């Protein structure tokens, strides 16, 4: 089964989106949206970005290079390789703006 989005109540009011993988492991948490309609629009934007967005390495050990497009196949292969040791490479963006809905 592929991953899925969950629409949940935000602790301070409004709504957040959680992205979970096929096993239910948390992958990301969105910013707070004021309405369900805005959250649903955020999901549509996240789907668009996930399918076409560039990968920008902003980690401390990044190599100086221009951002480049990575195919879905290459991304999945790299992700499987990096989590082969049994870990779940999780990206949680809670508490900061992810660009979803902006």
Image (cartoon, rainbow, N blue to C red):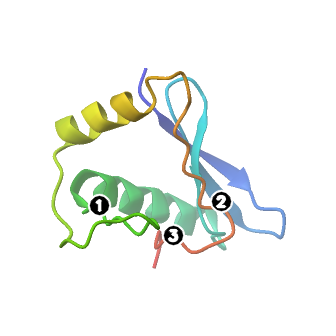
Residue, x 18% and y 73% (percent of image)?
66
Task: Please say if 45 is above or below 4.
Answer: below
Q: Position of residue 72 (x, y in %)?
A: 21, 41
Residue 56 falls in image quadrant: bottom left
Compare marks 1 and 3 and give the one earlier in the sequence: 1
Please give the name of the residue rendered at 19% of the width and 39% of the height, measured from the top-left corner.
74
**In the picture provided, is 59 more to the left or to the right than 62?**
right
Q: Are marks 1 and 3 in contact (CB under 8 Å)?
A: no
Q: To which residue does mark 1 refer?
A: 55
| Nearer to the camera, 88 or 17 | 88
The numbered mark, 2 or 3, whose residue comes first in the sequence reads 2
Compared to residue 1, the image places residue 58 above or below, namely below
The answer to whether residue 5 is left or right of residue 34 is: left
Which label's residue is closer to the chain start, 2 or 1? Answer: 2
In which image quadrant can residue 88 be found? top right
Residue indicated by mark 3? 98
Q: Secondary structure at mark 3?
A: loop
**Badge 2 density bin: few <14, some 14–19, many ≥20, Cα 10 Å:** many
Question: Where in the figure is residue 62, as x and y percent of width and height?
Answer: 35, 65
Picture coordinates of residue 90 (x, y %)? 56, 43
Q: Nearer the viewer, residue 76 or 13?
A: 76
Q: Please say if 89 is above or below 64.
A: above
Report how far apart the C-alphas of labels 2 and 1 lie in the structure. Answer: 23 Å
Q: Which mark is residue 16?
A: 2
Considering the numbered disc 2 on the image, is that residue within a helix, a strand or a loop? strand
Q: What is the C-alpha distance between the residues marked 1 and 3?
A: 14 Å
Residue furthest to the bottom = 102
Of the 4 image quadrants, the one containing the C terminus is: bottom left
Element assignment for label 1: loop
Residue at coordinates 20% horizontally, 71% vertically from top-left? Answer: 65
């Amino acid at each position: 089964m592929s991953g899925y989005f969950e629409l949940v109540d935000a602790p301070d009011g409004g709504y957040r989106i959680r992205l979970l993988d096929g096993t239910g492991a948390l992958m990301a948490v969105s910013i707070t949206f004021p309405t369900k309609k805005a959250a649903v629009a955020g999901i549509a934007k996240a789907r668009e970005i996930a399918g076409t967005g560039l990968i920008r390495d902003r980690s401390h050990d990044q190599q100086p290079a221009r951002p480049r497009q990575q195919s879905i196949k290459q991304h999945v292969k790299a992700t499987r390789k990096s989590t082969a040791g049994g870990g779940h490479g999780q990206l949680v963006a809670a508490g900061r703006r992810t660009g979803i809905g902006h």
